[in-house]
Image (cartoon, rainbow, N blue to C red):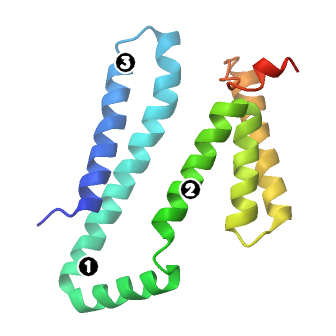
Amino acid sequence: MTFDSRILTTLVVFALFAGAALMALALPQKAAFMPLLIAVPGALLAGAQLLLDIRDMRREASDPDATRRAHRERVAEDGGRSEGVMFLWLGIFTALLLGAGFIVGGPLAVFLYVGFERRRNWRNATIAGLATLAVLYGIFIQLLELSLFPGLLLPGLSL
């Protein structure tokens, strides 16, 4: 079995999450909570993705011509723009989270992504943004009593 870059990337992500979870076990319980909250689901999802990637690699090995045709069709559908768009949205998410913080920037980023990338369905975008706000505020701030990053711009505005 040969490894391609997709499997290698997934394996690295899995190792990072699993390593973070193992390192968090050495911390006091209260300090370990947040790293475990992120690392355990991340490791589970990366492990599932690794299994899917290995399954797809075996499928591709059994019929390489069909795989090449499917890849060409995907590139033709995207117009080759998918990576550029992905990095654009990554930049938008990062700028909003750093500038406006999690409680404002997170819901706004989700609202914009769902609105613009999903064919301007503003009803769904509003629901997704409000659901993100509910999770961030209701679970992280109220239930878990965590303080989320307020952003670099909003605290300076003295709102």
Residue to which mark 1 is pinned:
59
What x and y, as percent, mark residue 30?
Answer: 53, 11
Report, in whole angstroms, how far the alpha carbon at label 1 lies from the one at label 3: 38 Å
What x and y, as percent, mark residue 73?
Answer: 43, 88
Residue to which mark 3 is pinned:
25
Residue displayed at 71% across by 23% down: 150
Report, in whole angstroms, how far the alpha carbon at label 1 lies from the one at label 2: 32 Å
Residue to which mark 2 is pinned:
88
Nearest the viewer among 91 and 29 is: 91
**In this rendering, is residue 143 above or below 29?**
below
| Left or right of residue 6: residue 81 | right
Could you tell me which secondary element the residue under label 1 belongs to? helix
Closer to the N terminus: mark 1 or mark 3? 3
**In this rendering, is residue 111 above or below 23?**
below
Amino acid type, residue under disc 1 in the picture: Arg
Q: Are marks 3 and 2 in contact (CB under 8 Å)?
A: no
Amino acid type, residue under disc 2 in the picture: Leu
